[in-house]
Image (cartoon, rainbow, N blue to C red):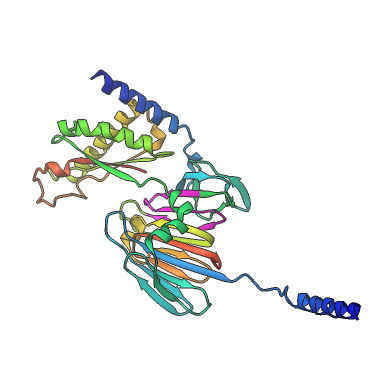
């Protein structure tokens, strides 16, 4: 009597087991989160899935595809989302930093203030792993366009040689001169403008 | 005055130490550099897997892959920053950038895993110029910072 019951139980258990390991493809889940920008401004993302479109334009807005065919919108909790993405966020490279140094008129000599400013660039370079340095020279509109192309390049070269002298390998530094094409302050031709006599140095 | 000079000399020393990585043998298609590499990180280029260290250049067509303990951060020539967490696969499908006009195109695919992104000059230049694909979606990037996850359902 007992044996019969045990046998039946085992049979039922075996039948149950046979049904459970169904092969199910792992469900796929995708999520996009818009973050506030470091400068305080939040950008925007346009997310497209299967003919649906969602524009995310406020901080921590999310779009998620869990069931194919549906694009779900939502709002993420800032702390939870930063925790969930912690490894990717902590692998973010340091942000590129740009310095502007100013020059005396028609020369590749720094203004006294910029001589001091130049010293601040070195700690920044040291803080960047495998640093790349981009040096771009500019002029005001005194002088001809070709002359100012040359002057802007001389200014950039001056910065490069100062950096190289301080031990930074020259193959880490890229130099360009843009002449009078990209003024900070727009002026008529032949107007001296100290704010346009500059070199922009980006440490990446 | 003396202490200032000592600080400066020390900093220059640090800079010189961090600059020992070679500057990527003049390959035409260098589009960025690995700035952060933790745990297992590799690049698949022309069907070859190569290990990655800080300073390794990234080229168009590369696929960056992290292991279960890995994460990696890349800085691109337009100042875009992309970083991926563990078990991630990121393909650099296209990168074109004119450093004078800031015009360009930047397309990547996160095939799986997690990514944090900060868009750079390409996205600033034109709203449709930067795109990120996942298996199910296409993201048009109008700026600037965002997160993407693509993978099995999270608990």
Residue at the image point whose x is 60% and y is 46% from the top: B50
On-image quarter of the N terminus of chain B? top left
- Classify residue B141 as left or right of residue B111: left
Residue at the image point whose x is 25% and y is 46% from the top: A178
- Classify residue A152 as left or right of residue B78: left
Q: Could you say where residue B97 lies in the image, as x and y percent from the top left?
A: 38, 55
Give the total number of marks visible in the rendering. 0
Q: Could you say where residue B101 lies in the image, as x and y percent from the top left?
A: 30, 55
Report the residue that reaches farthest toward the top: B2
Q: Nearer the viewer, residue A69 or A1?
A: A1
Residue B140, visible in the rendered structure: yes
- Classify residue A126 as left or right of residue A39: right
Report the residue that reaches farthest toward the front: A1
Q: Is residue B32 above or below residue A170?
A: below
Q: Could you say where residue A64 lies in the image, as x and y percent from the top left?
A: 46, 71
Report if residue A113 lies within the magenta region. Answer: no
The answer to which image quadrant residue A23 occupies is bottom right
Residue B31, visible in the rendered structure: no
Q: Please provide the residue range marked out in magenta.
A: B72-97
Q: Nearer the viewer, residue B61 or A67?
A: A67
Q: Could you say where residue B96 lies in the image, as x and y percent from the top left?
A: 42, 56
Residue at the image point whose x is 49% and y is 63% from the top: B149
Report if residue B91 lies within the magenta region. Answer: yes
Residue at the image point whose x is 15% and y is 30% from the top: A112
The answer to which image quadrant residue A171 occupies is top left
On-image quarter of the C terminus of chain B? bottom right
Majority secondary structure of magenta residues:
strand
Q: Is residue A94 above or below residue A168?
A: below
């Amino acid at each position: 009597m007992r044996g019969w019951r045990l046998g039946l139980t085992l049979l039922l258990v075996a039948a149950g087991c046979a049904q459970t390991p169904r092969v199910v493809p792992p469900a796929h889940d995708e999520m996009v989160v818009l973050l506030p920008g470091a400068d305080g401004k939040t950008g925007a993302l346009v997310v497209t899935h299967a003919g649906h479109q969602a524009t995310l334009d406020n901080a921590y807005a999310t779009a998620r595809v869990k069931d194919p065919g549906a694009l779900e919108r939502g709002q993420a909790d800032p702390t939870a989302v930063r925790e969930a993405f912690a490894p990717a966020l902590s692998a973010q490279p340091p942000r590129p930093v740009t310095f502007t140094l100013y020059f005396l008129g028609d020369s590749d000599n720094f203004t006294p203030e910029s001589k001091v400013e130049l010293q601040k660039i070195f700690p920044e370079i040291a803080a960047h792993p495998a640093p790349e340095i981009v040096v771009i020279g500019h002029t005001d509109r005194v002088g001809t366009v070709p002359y100012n192309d040359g002057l802007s390049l001389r200014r950039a070269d001056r910065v490069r040689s100062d950096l190289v002298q301080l031990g930074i390998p020259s193959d880490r530094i890229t130099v360009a001169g843009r002449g009078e094409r990209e003024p900070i302050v727009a002026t008529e031709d032949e107007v001296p403008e100290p704010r346009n006599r500059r070199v922009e140095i980006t440490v990446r | 005055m003396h202490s200032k000079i000592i600080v400066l000399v020390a900093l220059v020393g640090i800079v010189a130490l961090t600059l020992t990585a070679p500057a990527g043998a003049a390959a035409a298609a260098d589009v960025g550099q690995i700035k952060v590499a933790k745990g297992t990180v590799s690049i698949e280029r022309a069907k070859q897997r190569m290990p990655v260290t800080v300073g390794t250049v990234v080229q168009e067509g590369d696929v960056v892959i992290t292991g279960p303990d890995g994460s990696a951060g890349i800085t691109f020539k337009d100042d875009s920053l992309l970083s991926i967490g563990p078990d991630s696969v990121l393909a650099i499908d296209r990168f074109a950038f004119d450093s004078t006009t800031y015009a360009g195109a930047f397309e990547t695919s996160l095939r799986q895993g997690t990514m944090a992104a900060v868009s750079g000059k390409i996205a600033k230049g034109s709203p449709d110029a930067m795109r990120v694909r996942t298996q199910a979606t296409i993201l048009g990037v109008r700026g600037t910072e965002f997160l993407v996850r693509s993978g099995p359902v999270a608990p």
